[in-house]
Image: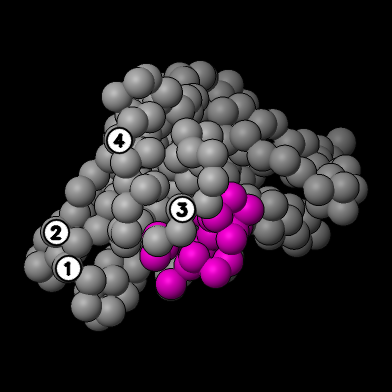
Amino acid sequence: METHPSILCTGSIEIPENVRTYCNDIVLDVVPYIEVRAINDDHTQKAIQKVAASMAVVVFTSFNAVTAVAECIDAIPENWQIYCLSGKTQETVVKHFGVGKIVAVAPDSATLASIIAADGVTHAIFFCGNIRMDTLPVSLAEKGVKLTELIVYFTEAQTSVANKHYDGILFFSPSAVRSYFLQNKPHDNTTMFAIGNTTAAEIAKYCRNDIVVAATPSKEKMLLMAAQWAKETRQ
């Protein structure tokens, strides 16, 4: 008896109705491999509020950072110039701070750093998590841009054993990749889906499976792409 294609999603996701309908004949398991929580202690809140009251070039590479910062301020900062990644991060910036605050967006941190440097920025504030990747800080340092980092959320691994075979596995962050591989090894014929190049590079450190990078850094579009791929491979 032929089984339905199966996909493991390693992070939380809000699935639109049209995508849910398309995935009806696919076995979809959503098992978050990381837990994210905002840092809301007095020191962090005051640091965020101080930046909010100043003229600053602000950088976001995670929607979690955007959400954590937005929770600490009462009004949209008047004098911010925001550089951020496209996809969910950009969408969250627009939601909380408005599209007019965004100076530039990029699909990955390396490209974003090049844009920031090319714009003549000499100093920027980077709101990030406790295990952020080195790409942006290192790239900006090499380009002579001073970066002040402000950690506004924690990411913690949530280990879980995937005790079944999946046709495809979706990863939305490098930290989820690291957490998954703590206790799991995918089948050789499992295809790995990455939300961006940085996540794809992290996957490649742990396995030689085929890796598909999402054309758009969107969880929902990535799931739809994986579902379409799964159906086509089973035809």
Residue 38 colored in magenta in the image: no
Residue 77 is labelled as 3
- Front residue of this view, candidates 173 and 81: 81
Per the rendered image, the range of residues in magenta is: 80-103
Residue 212 can be seen in this image: no
The secondary structure type at the circle numbered 3 is: loop
Instruction: Provide residue 110's location: percent of width, then percent of height.
Output: 29, 66
Q: Mark 1 highlights which residue?
A: 122
Mark 2–mark 1 CB contact (< 8 Å): yes
Q: Amino acid at mark 2?
A: Lys
According to the image, what is the colour scheme of the structure? one colour
3D distance between C-alphas at marks 4 and 3: 14 Å
| Residue 208 sits above or below residue 141 on the image | above
Q: Mark 4 highlights which residue?
A: 47
Q: Amino acid at mark 1?
A: Thr
Q: Residues within 10 Å of mark 2 (few under 14, many from 20)?
A: some
Q: Nearer the viewer, mark 3 or mark 2?
A: 3
The residue at the point 54 percent across, 39 percent down is 74
Q: Mark 2 highlights which residue?
A: 146
Instruction: Provide residue 175's location: percent of width, then percent of height.
Output: 39, 37
3D distance between C-alphas at marks 1 and 3: 20 Å
Q: Quadrant of residue 222?
A: bottom right
The residue at the point 80 percent across, 59 percent down is 235
Instruction: Provide residue 35's location: percent of width, then percent of height.
Output: 49, 25
